[in-house]
Amino acid sequence: MPPPAQNKVDAAFIRSSSSLVSNNILDIGAPAGSARNPRLFEFVKKSGRGTGLTNGVVTTINATVDVVYDEGECLGTVSFIGQAIIEGDAGQNFAFCGDSGSPVVSTSNQPVGLLFAAVLGGPAPFAVMHPLPEVLTQLNVQLF
C-alpha cells in the first residue's frame, strides 16, 4: 500500500486578466505587500460570502487536519499538512458555508492565507486556512 498523500492545498485557479478582476477585497480593500505565512497568535480578517467581514486569531500553525468531504464528492476524509487554524473573535465563527476560497489577511492587509474549511460544532469553532505562499507555489501563480 502506498504512503498517504501529503496534501497541502485544496484550491483551483482560473486564468484571468487584471482588466476583468479587481484587486480589492470586499470590506477590506487592496492587499498590501507580498504573500507571507501566517504567524502564531496573529490577528487576521477575511471577507466571505457566508459571513461577510470577520476577525480572528491564528491559534495553530503547521497543523495536520482531516477534512471530511461530502459523500457526493466520493473523496471521504482527506488529510492536509502545514495548515493554520483560526478562531473567531469572542467565540464567534470566523467562517461558515460559502466562505471557502476567501483570502485571509493580516490587520495591515498583508495576504497570509486562503480559507478552505471550518469546524462549526462544539465549544470552540474554528476555521482552517492554507498558508498563501504554499497555495501560490502549488498553483504556480503570483499575486498581481
Image: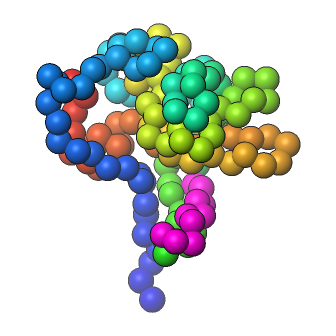
Q: Does the magenta run of residues contain 72? A: yes
Quadrant assignment, res 64: bottom right
Find out whether residue 12 is within the magenta segment.
no
Q: Quadrant of residue 84?
A: top right
User: Residue 114, image x and y in percent?
Assistant: 44, 37
Q: Which residue extends farthest bottom?
A: 1
Residue at x-position 23% and y-position 44% = 14
The residue closer to the viewer here, 48 or 85, is 48
Residue for point 27% across, 45% down? 13
Residue at x 85% of width, y 43% of height: 123
- Give the magenta-colored segment's residue range: 64-73
Tell me the quadrant of the picture where the C terminus can be found. Answer: top left
Relative placement, left or right, of 65 versus 137 is right
Tell whether 54 sits left or right of 104: right
Residue 55 on image: x %, y %: 63, 21
Is 106 on the left or on the right of 143, as rendered? right
Colour mode of the rendering: rainbow
Question: Which residue is rendered at x = 57% and y = 66% of the image?
Answer: 70
| Residue 7 visible (yes or no) | yes
Residue 50 vertical position relative to residue 64 in the rendered view, above or below: above
Rendered location of residue 134, percent (x, y): 36, 43
Q: Position of residue 122 (x, y in %)?
A: 83, 48
